[in-house]
Amino acid sequence: MCGRFTIRTPLAALAARFLFDDLGEGLAPAAGDALRDADGGLRPRWNVAPTQPVPVLRAGPAAGADGPARRRLDLLRWGLVPSWAREPGDRAVGARLINARGETAHARPAFRDAFARRRCAVLADGFYEWRRDGRRREPFHFRRPDGGPVALAGLWARWRPPGADGPPLETCAVVTTHANAVVADIHDRMPVLLDDDGLARWLDPAFGEDPAPLRALLVPCPSTDLVAVPVSSWVNDVHHDDPRCLDPPGSAPPPPPGPRPRRGGRPAPAPPEQRLLFPDL
DNA sequence: CCAGACGTTGTT
DNA sequence: GTCTGG
DNA sequence: CCAGACGTTGTT
DNA sequence: GTCTGG
């Protein structure tokens, strides 16, 4: 679950909603300017897939004498690459770790360290789940009744290229849990949606590394927090990233005949975009 | 000890 | 890095 | 998560 | 069937 989602809310609006400091005193002063230029780094998205940059909320630099800890908002690659991975594209670990089970992540070698010290929240305004009916995959979009953004519990990692040449690669995974009553008809798992209180605890290093209180946060959100909307199978194709993803079912045109251009053969161009809005962590 | 995995999902 | 299996 | 590929040789 | 790419 949680292998696809939407994020149409501009980063500046996400900052206004989530980027208050740990005392809830409002937008951190440093955030305004940094975010003003940042919206170009994340156009509205209707079909966010693993390996792509996603907006991630983390605890800022540790609280010091000069003030309380602040939050930071960055774009991280979705698909957790542990620090010990040989290559980001490694067979077992590369970009495969897009979800972490809330029930077990604290104990898993691949997630243990992140669970204790590198927790985050992936910001979205809805997520997709597919109902499987034989060969059919029927997509549904889940979102808050008011359409507002949600904070998905996440874990992150930093991978450094050998020899310390090139920038570090920061990646993340979304924590999953049992489906609540709204999701259960479609699927048996769902991402963990954190309310403001749970979010503050999940992100705060001072909340501790003891798994038990943290695991208590990783439960299904109340069913009243989500509505299920059946959508067009247009969203099934990851290349379709436009408003038609949220159209009602049955409106997708038939798949065009003929093969697509093949993989391989040509060199891979575009390097992955990743943006650290506060690169001092 | 060293070598190899390290994960989730869904499907059967 | 750390755990598991052999 | 779903869609689509699933390969090697030799040439530029 | 299974893996990779997005």
Image (cartoon, coloured by chain):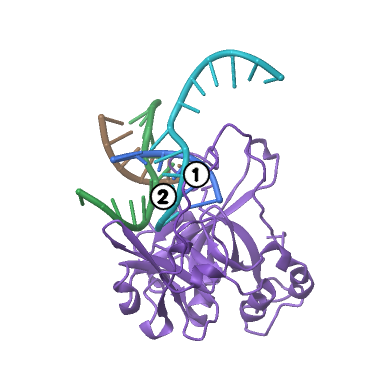
Chain colours: A purple, B green, C brown, D cyan, E blue
Image quarter (top left, top right, bottom left or bottom right) of the N terminus of chain A: bottom left
Q: Is residue A110 above or below residue A128?
A: above
Depth check: give the residue in front, A281 or A161: A161
- Number of disc labels: 2
- The residue tagged 1 is A94
Q: Mark 2: which amino acid? A: Pro
As helix, strand or loop, the secondary structure at mark 1 comes to: loop
What percent of the width, then of the height, locates residue A158? 59, 51
- Taking the spot 68% from the left edge, 84% from the top edge, the residue there is A26
Tell me, yes or no, whether the two marked residues, 1 and 2, touch with CB atoms within 8 Å: no
Q: In this view, does C3 lie to the left or right of A65?
A: left
Same chain, labels 1 and 2: yes
Depth check: give the residue in front, A264 or A10: A264
Q: In this view, does A185 lie above or below A94?
A: below
Q: Is residue A170 left or right of residue A251?
A: right
What percent of the width, then of the height, locates residue A87? 55, 38
Image quarter (top left, top right, bottom left or bottom right) of the C terminus of chain A: bottom right
Q: Quadrant of residue A78?
A: bottom right
Q: In this view, does A187 lie above or below A156?
A: below
Q: Mark 1: which amino acid? A: Gly
- Taking the spot 52% from the left edge, 44% from the top edge, the residue there is A260
As helix, strand or loop, the secondary structure at mark 2 comes to: loop
- The residue tagged 2 is A109
Q: Quadrant of residue A227?
A: bottom left
Residue A122 in view = no
Q: Is residue A229 left or right of residue A167?
A: left
| Callout 2: chain | A
